[in-house]
């Protein structure tokens, strides 16, 4: 038997064209066979209107690193006797935290995104004309030995989300009275087959809050009635996207105070837009920032970039801002759906001879040629981060050279398995291919064209 919430979900109309995109992505999950990769050779109720997004919007999305214990250099080191070398650096333990995007409907969290990015997609939320828009874009703070949290945002606001389950009729009556008195905002109330009720409680917090840490507590992005678009006369999908756009460029600041008396603060810059669906992973979705083509599946949402945990690259081709979608990053299924082809980079089409620029400071660790990549070059940027430049005509640097970000390292060509002049640009972190788009900040991403 289905509960009331599930029955309601089945009658939500999905926006035009969205089902086709979801089906397109779902077909890609049909085969499990994985193709080999090519990388650097050594890299092995009431007035409330529930927000229910239907097919692709049954959950929120990705995650950042979970909190853990890390080691940091001590502020002061013991002095060595005169004439002796200083001893080794003393490392002291310290606590850390992370953010995790939270799926309200399923209670799931997801693996970290490339470059420590978090992709939020709207889940169970609520819009009221006098209470504002509880967007359903949720996150949790994760970590050990956290005692208090401080959260603030410089645009819009935040809210607290808590799911109440196994409620009796008497308990439900108390919640209904709280809603009637204006003390509680809630979304879809549901009842299970055994007669027990469950419902989410949403509490607007304004732009900042400080409270005791609860690992089960979720927080979301909220708009006041004055800020939200709802009631404008536009269709629901457009209104929801415009409300999400309100947070574009916002800064979220989170400070955790730990049991040892220390604190850690992290800031996240938010950007809105279509999040490209890379693949289905055991029932969840991997979402990437923007650059979804007209025929590609995407979900409109928020993308958070950690100022402390992310590493940013410069655009590697002079005078070009186009990314080809004929051979996108990730897995593509050949006709018939039995064979998969994996592309570990993005293709940037441009005229032959156009300068190729180093995406970051680094050293040239490898140059060479093979039948697939043509002329290629590898740059090592430290801490396990490498970039690869393939299909090149030639290079202006050699193995062992040190280069600076933005320095010319070669020229665009059409070598290897190429059908026209372009740069195949790849990013590898600790031996694993990453989506390069996640390594460009929102200012660069906003200028890119996908065709």
Image (cartoon, rainbow, N blue to C red):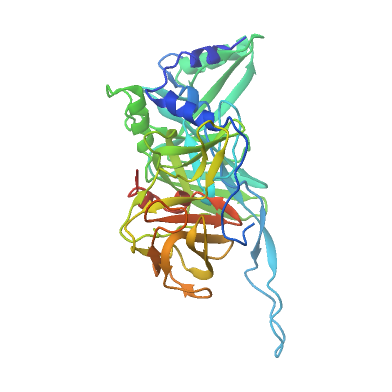
Residue 308 appears in the figure? no
* Direction from residue 129 to residue 12 in the image, left or right: right
* In the depicted structure, whether residue 93 falls above or below residue 231: below
In the image shown, does 289 or 363 lie closer to the viewer? 363
* In the depicted structure, whether residue 200 falls above or below residue 68: above
Residue 381 position, x and y percent, is: 52, 65
Q: Where is residue 107, by image quadrant?
A: top right
Farthest left residue in view: 233
Q: Quarter holding the N terminus?
A: top right
> Total marks drawn?
0
Farthest bottom residue in view: 83
In the image shown, does 147 or 344 lie closer to the viewer? 344
Residue 11 appears in the figure? yes
Residue 182 position, x and y percent, is: 44, 20
* In the depicted structure, whether residue 14 falls above or below residue 88: above
Q: Where is residue 271, by image quadrant?
A: top left
* Direction from residue 441 to residue 193 in the image, left or right: right
Q: Quarter holding the C terminus?
A: top left
Residue 260 position, x and y percent, is: 67, 54
Taking the spot 40% from the left edge, 51% from the top edge, the residue there is 419
Taking the spot 60% from the left edge, 22% from the top edge, the residue there is 164
Residue 84 position, x and y percent, is: 72, 87
């Amino acid at each position: 038997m289905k509960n009331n919430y599930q029955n309601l979900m089945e009658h939500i109309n999905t926006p035009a064209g969205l089902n086709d995109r979801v089906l397109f992505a779902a077909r890609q999950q049909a085969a499990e066979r994985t193709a080999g990769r090519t990388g650097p050779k050594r890299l092995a109720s009431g007035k409330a209107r529930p927000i229910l997004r239907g097919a692709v919007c049954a959950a929120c999305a990705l995650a950042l690193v979970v909190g853990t214990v890390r080691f940091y250099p001590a502020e002061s080191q013991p002095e060595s006797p005169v004439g002796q070398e200083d001893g080794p650096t003393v490392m002291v333990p310290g606590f850390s935290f992370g953010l995790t995007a939270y799926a309200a409907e399923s209670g799931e969290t997801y693996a970290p995104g490339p470059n420590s990015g978090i992709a939020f997609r709207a889940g169970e939320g609520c819009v009221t004309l006098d209470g504002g828009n509880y967007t359903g874009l949720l996150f949790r703070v994760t970590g050990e030995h956290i005692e208090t949290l401080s959260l603030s945002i410089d645009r819009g606001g935040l809210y607290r989300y808590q799911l109440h389950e196994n409620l009796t009729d008497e308990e439900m009556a108390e919640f209904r009275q709280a809603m009637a008195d204006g003390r509680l905002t809630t979304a879809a109330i549901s009842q299970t087959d055994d007669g027990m009720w469950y419902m989410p409680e949403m509490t607007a917090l304004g732009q900042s809050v400080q409270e005791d840490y609860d690992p089960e507590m979720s927080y979301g992005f909220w708009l006041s009635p004055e800020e939200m678009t709802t009631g404008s006369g536009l269709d629901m999908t457009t209104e929801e996207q415009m409300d999400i756009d309100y947070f574009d460029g916002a800064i979220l600041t989170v400070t955790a105070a730990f049991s040892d008396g220390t604190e850690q603060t992290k800031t996240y810059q938010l950007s809105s837009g279509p999040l490209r669906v890379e693949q289905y992973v055991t029932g969840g979705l991997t979402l990437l920032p923007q650059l979804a083509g007209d025929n590609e599946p995407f979900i409109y949402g928020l993308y958070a970039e950690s100022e402390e945990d992310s590493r940013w690259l410069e655009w590697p081709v002079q005078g070009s801002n186009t990314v080809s979608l004929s051979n996108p990053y990730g897995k593509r299924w050949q006709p018939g759906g039995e064979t998969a082809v994996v592309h570990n980079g993005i293709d940037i089409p441009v005229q032959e001879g156009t300068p190729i620029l180093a995406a970051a400071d680094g050293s040239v660790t490898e140059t060479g040629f093979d039948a697939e990549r043509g002329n290629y070059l590898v740059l090592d940027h430290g801490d396990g981060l490498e970039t690869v430049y393939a299909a090149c005509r030639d290079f202006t640097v050699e193995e062992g050279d040190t280069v600076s970000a933005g320095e010319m390292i070669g020229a665009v060509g059409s070598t290897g398995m190429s059908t026209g002049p372009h740069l195949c640009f790849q990013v590898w972190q600790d031996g694993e291919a990453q989506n390069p788009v996640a390594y460009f900040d929102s200012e660069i991403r906003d200028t890119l064209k996908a065709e």
